[in-house]
Image (spheres, grey):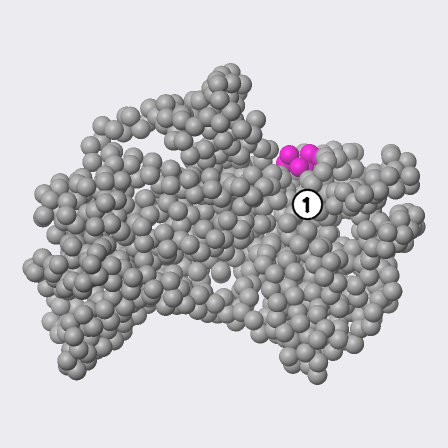
């Protein structure tokens, strides 16, 4: 099943299918390792509901839900 | 001598390696992107000396952030003899992403595999030889914190020969082949690197003449090469390089970092913990009643003062004891301050009495004792608290907690139109505006940076702290009202609120724009390295002492001379200071400050405040130094009260209120307005120079005006409201009007500015909305940009 990274619940894992968005933001996602094929685990949501923290490629990354909505993930 | 560039991700220990190599005292932090200056040093331990250039911490060589552009331009244009690519072995995959890009250039690369000690501790193994085979460049395991492997790294780096052409990941290389020929024909070095960047539709490459055409000839216009290339790099790394690491049994357990994180970013406790940490830091630095051991209010106090214990308070031993305990236990920050002040005062008294005994002239002891030593010592006395505060912020930064604070607070900051990352430079502003302004380079968005730099001075820096504590202490001592801690704390709060309001105003008017993205690494929690922390503090001490002995020294001497010479350049004794050059300048500008409460209404000594505010523009430490110098002179002029009595600011306050008959409430309001004015006005020379360098072209003039307008408005509001209360209504109406106009404009219902635009291309006055004509509050300048 595919869904957006922003819709993930704590503890859910998956593999990145596609990365949307454009320009600097998209490039930044790529540079930080969010590329098709990368496996991500949703770690937690910040106390105020946004941003989120994910584990990928062996480290912790934080991004806002708005940016996570550009990432389509195949749920494991 | 060969030159090497240090390149690597933020938080990979690059600065630690730089320190280990060069012995320089560079700052080490855990906040992504703290290294934004270009630092150079020389490695002298090997057989051959080598120059080392520290590049900013970067994740990639894309053209989007200033750091990336700095690093890219250095590698391509300056052509160093080699790149030392420092790679965090605990996070191989993402770190090697940059390596694949560096390898595409013609510059020889050596990989320093850092934090091998932590990899071993986690029970993992890395096959260095396999990594070296696959990458085709030397790979040296090191532990920068302990200095292990550094000698081998440098000997192999120096031995590296020239490299013939770059190498690229196979899946990318053949696609870039044709474009590479385009660059080869142009005679550009590192053609492979440029070709791949062009394929990615890199802005910098596309601006080259002919590049657009060459790209169109090769690509079908449909394939998304940016994604293909990023994917190719990571696929290569995970297939060919990551297997070099074998994970031990331990890495499956919940790491210590995760456990700490669970508490610190807890859904409910995160924010209370953050507030508690902030409170604890300020309490440990400034409190004169540690952990409220002596009760929360004066009435609850039960600890006797040393005098009440029957001790001889004139003996040095008891004075020393009084630094730690005197009617209450002091905080570490306060204890250090007391000890330093005690030593400095003892030294000063010794020098002055020595000079008097030797029969020196009155003016000579005056300029040495009151002018030079008095000024410098009053500034040095605040050094301990500034250092303690610095230490706490470095601890937060180095431990990795600062990044979590940004994570927790981003939601709040986004509302004001900046990202959680902007929080970092702001809170650094509590230490010093200069590094804070430099740190804004981690913000990719230009408008966000401009807004952040403008409000940084509102986060009261270490040098402004003396103004807060001295004036607050003066109010309490002179009038016996209030609580100096509370006043200080409220002033800090006021600065923060002012910053938020101003950011909101700017982001909705002159600096409108989308909230920039927030995609940030959360580094693992680390125990801060003691050595790095001490190096950092030593660096700060040196910087501060140097400032005390140069700028502040010069200005205290100038102030002393101006206050002891009249316009005919005749020496005036302290008692005739009213005729001095300084007094007449001060009296001339005094009326400017009348709306703020510390102008003409303070009578014949009011000019002291005007002069102090002006000297503060050179360095904020000067404000209190000026008071100290001038208070002594006024004491002598009045011929009443001992010098010691008036030396304190409280003495000056008592004298002025006795002389003018100004009401306690009005004067208190004026003094608080004075603090607020100094806090939010144009910062010191050093901060202005830094801000000018960091701001986009042409924004500095408006920034200066913004600071003046903001401080004048805030101080006027405090004074008028504090003195009479009824102006509160007027100010509230003015603020509500401005807010309403902005909301109306943003929602597109009524754009007031368009009327001005039609009449006049360069509108100036808009006083009707409580806006001055500075252009930086937003309403005026916004029209130009539209």
Q: Nearer the viewer, residue B583 or B8?
A: B583
Relative image position of residue B476 (x, y in whole percent): 19, 51
Residue ID at (55%, 66%): B26
Q: Which residue is mark 1?
A: B64
Is residue A70 shown above or below B160?
above
Res B436 seen here: no
Look at the image and say whether residue A69 sits in the magenta stretch: yes
Q: Residues within 10 Å of mark 1 (few under 14, many from 20)?
A: some
Please provide the residue range marked out in magenta: A65-70
Q: Output the chain of dot 1.
A: B
Residue ID at (66%, 69%): B52
Look at the image and say whether residue B281 sits in the magenta stretch: no
Horizontal side, residue B395 vs residue B521: left or right: left
Horizontal side, residue B349 vs residue B203: left or right: left
Relative image position of residue B642 (x, y in whole percent): 10, 64
Q: Nearer the viewer, residue B533 or A6?
A: B533
Residue ID at (26%, 48%): B610
Residue ID at (60%, 64%): B39
């Amino acid at each position: 099943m595919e869904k957006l990274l922003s819709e993930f619940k704590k503890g859910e894992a998956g593999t990145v299918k596609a990365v949307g968005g454009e320009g600097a933001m998209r490039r930044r996602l790529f540079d930080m390792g969010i590329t098709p094929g990368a496996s991500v685990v949703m770690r937690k949501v910040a106390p105020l509901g946004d941003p989120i923290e994910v584990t990928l490629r062996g480290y912790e990354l934080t991004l806002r839900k708005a940016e996570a909505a550009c990432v389509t993930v195949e749920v494991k | 001598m060969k030159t090497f560039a240090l390149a690597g991700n933020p938080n990979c220990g690059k600065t630690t390696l730089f320190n280990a190599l060069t012995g320089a005292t560079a700052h080490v932090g855990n906040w992504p992107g703290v290294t934004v200056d270009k630092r150079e040093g020389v490695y002298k331990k090997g057989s051959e000396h080598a120059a080392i250039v520290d590049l900013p911490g970067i994740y990639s060589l894309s053209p989007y952030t200033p750091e990336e552009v700095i690093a890219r331009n250095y590698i391509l244009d300056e052509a160093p003899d080699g790149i030392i690519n420092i790679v965090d072995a605990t996070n191989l995959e993402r770190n090697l992403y940059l390596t694949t890009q560096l390898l595409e250039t013609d510059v020889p690369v050596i990989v320093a595999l850092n934090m091998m000690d932590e990899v071993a501790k986690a029970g993992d193994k890395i096959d260095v030889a396999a990594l070296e085979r696959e990458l085709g460049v030397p790979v040296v395991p090191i532990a920068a914190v302990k200095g292990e492997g550094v000698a081998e790294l440098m000997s192999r780096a120096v031995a590296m020969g020239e490299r013939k052409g770059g190498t690229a990941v196979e899946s990318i290389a053949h696609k870039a082949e044709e474009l590479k020929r385009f660059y080869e024909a142009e005679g550009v070095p590192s053609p492979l690197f440029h070709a791949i960047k062009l394929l990615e539709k890199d802005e910098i490459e596309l601006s080259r003449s002919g590049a657009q055409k060459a790209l169109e000839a090769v690509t079908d216009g449909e394939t998304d090469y940016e994604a293909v290339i990023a994917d190719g790099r990571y696929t290569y790394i995970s297939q060919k390089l990551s297997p070099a690491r074998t994970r031990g049994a331990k890495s499956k357990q919940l790491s210590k970092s995760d456990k700490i994180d669970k508490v610190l970013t807890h859904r409910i406790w995160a924010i209370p913990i953050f507030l508690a940490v902030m409170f604890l830091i300020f309490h440990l630095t400034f409190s004169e009643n540690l952990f409220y051991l002596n009760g929360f209010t004066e009435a609850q106090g039960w600890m006797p003062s040393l005098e009440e214990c029957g001790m001889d308070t004139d003996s040095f031993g008891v004075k020393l004891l009084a630094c730690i305990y005197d009617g209450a236990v002091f905080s570490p920050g306060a204890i250090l301050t007391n000890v330093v002040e005690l030593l400095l005062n003892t030294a000063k008294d010794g020098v002055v009495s020595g000079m008097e005994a030797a029969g020196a002239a009155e003016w000579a002891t005056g300029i040495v004792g009151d002018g030079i030593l008095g000024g410098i010592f009053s500034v040095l006395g605040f050094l301990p608290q500034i250092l303690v505060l610095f230490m706490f912020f470095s601890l937060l930064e180095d431990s990795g907690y600062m990044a979590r604070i940004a994570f927790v607070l981003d939601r709040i900051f986004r509302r004001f139109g900046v990202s959680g990352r902007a929080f970092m430079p702001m809170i650094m502003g509590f230490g010093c505006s200069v590094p804070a302004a430099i740190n804004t380079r981690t913000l990719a968005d230009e408008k966000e940076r401009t807004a952040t730099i403008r409000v940084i001075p509102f986060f009261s820096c270490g040098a402004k702290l003396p103004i807060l504590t001295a004036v607050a202490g003066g109010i309490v001592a002179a009038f016996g009202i209030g609580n100096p801690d509370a006043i200080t704390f409220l002033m800090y709060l006021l600065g923060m609120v002012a910053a938020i309001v101003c950011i909101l105003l700017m982001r909705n008017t002159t600096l409108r724009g989308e909230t920039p993205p927030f995609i940030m690494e959360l580094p693992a929690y680390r125990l801060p390295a003691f050595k790095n922390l001490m190096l950092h503090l030593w660096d700060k001490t040196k910087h501060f002492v140097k400032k005390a002995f140069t700028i502040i020294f010069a200005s205290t001497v100038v102030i002393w001379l101006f206050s002891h010479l009249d316009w005919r350049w005749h020496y005036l004794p302290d008692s005739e200071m009213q005729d001095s050059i300084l007094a007449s300048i001060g009296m001339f500008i005094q009326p400017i400050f009348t709306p703020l409460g510390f102008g003409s209404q303070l009578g014949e000594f009011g000019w002291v405040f005007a002069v102090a505010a002006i000297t503060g523009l050179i360095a904020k430490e000067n404000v209190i130094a000026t008071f100290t110098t001038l208070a002594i002179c006024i004491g002598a002029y009045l011929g009443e009260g001992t010098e010691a009595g008036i030396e304190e600011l409280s003495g000056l306050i008592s004298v002025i209120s006795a002389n003018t008959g100004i009401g306690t409430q009005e004067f208190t309001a004026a003094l608080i307005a004075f603090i607020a004015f100094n806090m939010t006005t144009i910062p010191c020379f050093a901060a202005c120079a830094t801000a000018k360098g960091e701001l986009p072209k042409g924004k500095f003039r408006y920034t200066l005006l913004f600071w003046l307008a903001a401080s004048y408005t805030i101080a006027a509001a405090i004074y008028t409201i504090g003195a009479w209360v009824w102006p509160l209504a007027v100010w509230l109406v003015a603020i509500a009007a401005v807010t309403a106009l902005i909301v109306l404009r943003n929602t597109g219902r009524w754009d007031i500015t368009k009327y001005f635009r039609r009449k006049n291309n360069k509108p100036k006055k808009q006083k009707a909305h409580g806006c001055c004509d500075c252009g930086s509050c937003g309403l005026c300048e916004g029209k130009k940009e539209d």
